[in-house]
Image (cartoon, rainbow, N blue to C red):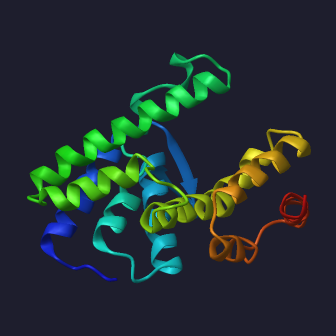
């Protein structure tokens, strides 16, 4: 669904303005971006490609999925699985809080705001179609834009494990789309290995 309302544009601009404060930079096509701006643009592009008829609240959630992510440092939590999950949960709450403030300032009603927060908190994954859609897009963006860089820092066994965990969170439609993403020959082999184990 293409949304052109001034309210929607105001919200997207506000999300991007907030994420422009991210001090972490990333290069793409020869241009430097604030990391979370680039991520947000990739999320929107992938959602439009994967589910062009997505409702407005899903589009909003996709755009602010990582809003303010840099404000809670990973190293403030134990560097183990428990610490990672604690960090992720705190991040989700943080994203939802910022999104609520911005959407309220853009005069969105409580129904839309609650739906966006519901998605950002990843509620009812696997049972709620909208949550699953957002998770599918998150996983597709990871595979297309971030998996190669992750793989360069880790052993193949670890990479295959991460791919397996990613695929488990995806719908059959999304897995099908993931297998069509152009990746390096080695990455294609690792994805195939993860998908068949």
Residue at horizontal 36 percent and vertical 58 percent from the top? 61
Q: How many marks?
A: 0
Q: Quadrant of the N terminus?
A: bottom left
Query: Can residue 68 be seen by looking at this rendering?
Result: no
- Relative side of 79 to 45, left or right: right
Q: Quadrant of the C terminus?
A: bottom right
Give whichever of 148, 80 is nearer the camera: 80
- Relative side of 142 to 24, left or right: right
- Measured as percent of width and height from the top left, residue 62 is found at 41, 60
Give whichever of 135, 33 is nearer the camera: 135
Residue at horizontal 42 percent and vertical 30 percent from the top? 90
Question: Quadrant of the rendered structure where residue 152 is?
Answer: top right
Question: Quadrant of the rendered structure where residue 72 is?
Answer: top left
Give whichever of 131, 48 is nearer the camera: 131
Residue at horizontal 39 percent and vertical 50 percent from the top? 120
Is 41 situated above or below 119?
A: below
């Amino acid at each position: 669904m293409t949304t052109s309302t001034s309210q929607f544009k105001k919200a997207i601009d506000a999300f991007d303005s907030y994420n422009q404060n991210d001090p972490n930079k990333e290069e793409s096509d020869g241009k430097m971006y604030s990391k979370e701006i680039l991520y947000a643009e990739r999320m929107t592009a992938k959602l439009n490609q994967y589910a062009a008829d997505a409702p407005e609240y899903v589009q909003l959630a996709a755009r602010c999925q990582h809003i303010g992510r840099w404000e809670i440092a990973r190293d403030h939590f134990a560097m183990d699985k428990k610490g990672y999950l604690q960090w992720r949960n705190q991040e989700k709450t943080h994203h939802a809080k910022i999104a609520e403030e911005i959407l309220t300032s853009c005069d969105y009603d409580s129904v839309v705001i609650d739906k966006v927060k519901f998605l950002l908190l990843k509620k009812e994954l696997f049972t709620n179609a909208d949550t699953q859609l957002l998770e599918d897009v998150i996983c597709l963006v990871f595979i297309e834009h971030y998996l190669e860089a992750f793989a360069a820092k880790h052993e193949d066994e670890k990479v295959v494990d991460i791919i397996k965990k990613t695929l488990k969170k995806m719908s059959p439609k999304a897995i099908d789309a993931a297998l069509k993403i152009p990746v390096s020959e080695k990455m294609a082999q690792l994805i195939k290995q993860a998908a068949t184990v």
